[in-house]
Amino acid sequence: MLRALIVEDNAEFSAFLKSLLEIRFPSAMILQASDADEALHHLSLSQLDIVLVDISLPGGVNGLGLTELIRHNGASPPVVILTNHDLPEYRLAATRLGADRFLSKASSTADQIVKVIEELAAVESTREGESTTERSKEPRGGPLTLPTPSARR
């Protein structure tokens, strides 16, 4: 069973991600947070398989800072940065701070997002009646990206 945390202040995009995960991982436990404080609260109470984090978050800590806090506090779930800010300096900072992947919201597909989650969280996904299991927790491959708002619908 997938246990995921979505840290996203855009309610529409957060709902899209939650819906995607619920469809692909029917028994998943999906938590949502709109800022770093709420995310840290969830992390302190739950053992998670993956954390999906936007860079732009309200409050004093952005997604990069949250990633650093997650790693500094010894939390071990894979962290995937999901952002509209697809800039080399953000990619470098995300890697330096311990993010496992960096995805641009502008160009990834739903299938690419699911594949990254399967790879990093080693969870089972249900697709059109078929079940697949990713057995390795080792991060693989390079950065991926997310769909444009029109492609997500």
Image: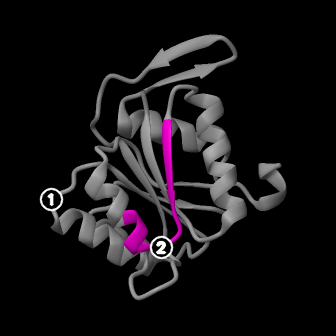
**What percent of the width, then of the height, locates residue 10?**
65, 69
* 146 with respect to 81 (left or right): right
Identify residue type, mark 1. Answer: Gly
Most distant residue in the bottom direction: 60
**What percent of the width, then of the height, locates residue 83?**
56, 68
User: Looking at the rendering, which quadrant does residue 93 occupy?
Assistant: bottom left
Q: Which residue is mark 2?
A: 35
> Quick one: quadrant of the N terminus?
top left
Determine the residue positioned at 32% across, 22% down.
Answer: 135
Q: Which residues are magenta?
A: 29-39
Identify residue type, mark 2. Answer: Asp
Does the magenta portion include 38? yes
* 111 with respect to 5 (left or right): right
**Contact? badges 1 and 2 (CB < 8 Å):** no
Sequence-wise first label, 1 or 2: 2
Query: CA separation, marks 1 and 2?
Result: 20 Å
Determine the residue positioned at 40% across, 35% down.
Answer: 119
Total numbered circles: 2
User: Dot 2 lies on which element?
Assistant: loop
